[in-house]
Amino acid sequence: MKRRQFTLSSLAFFSALATNCHARPIDKSTKEVGPVSWGRDYTKALADSKSSGKPIFLFFQEVPG
């Protein structure tokens, strides 16, 4: 009984997923926000964030070794 319930719920889930995952055409009328200036100084970023009221986005990249 549980196996049948699992099978039916899985079928319903994947059917819903398949109907919602369709390719959308690219809208060429939208403009990009603009280039991003990535900084490397955390203390300067904190100061800039405090003065402008904008949040900080931290991007961590794995360092090999």
Image (tube, rainbow, N blue to C red):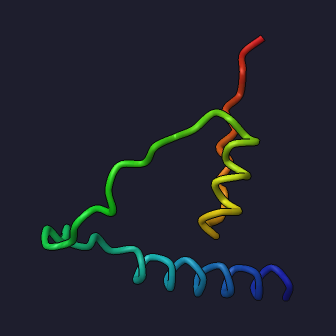
Query: Residue 63 at what x, y percent from top left?
Result: 72, 21
Question: Furthest residue to the top?
Answer: 65
Answer above or below: position of 36 versus 19. above
Query: Residue 40 at what x, y percent from top left?
Result: 63, 33
Identify the residue at horizontal 33%, vertical 63% (top origin): 33
Q: Is residue 5 left or right of residue 44?
A: right
Identify the residue at horizontal 42%, vertical 81% (top origin): 20
Answer above or below: position of 7 versus 44. below
Q: Is residue 29 left or right of residue 17?
A: left
Observer-nearest of 37 and 21: 37
Observer-nearest of 49 and 10: 49
Q: Is residue 3 left or right of residue 58?
A: right
Quarter the N terminus occupies = bottom right
Quarter the C terminus occupies = top right
Answer above or below: position of 49 versus 20. above
Observer-nearest of 21 and 42: 42
Answer above or below: position of 26 versus 57. below
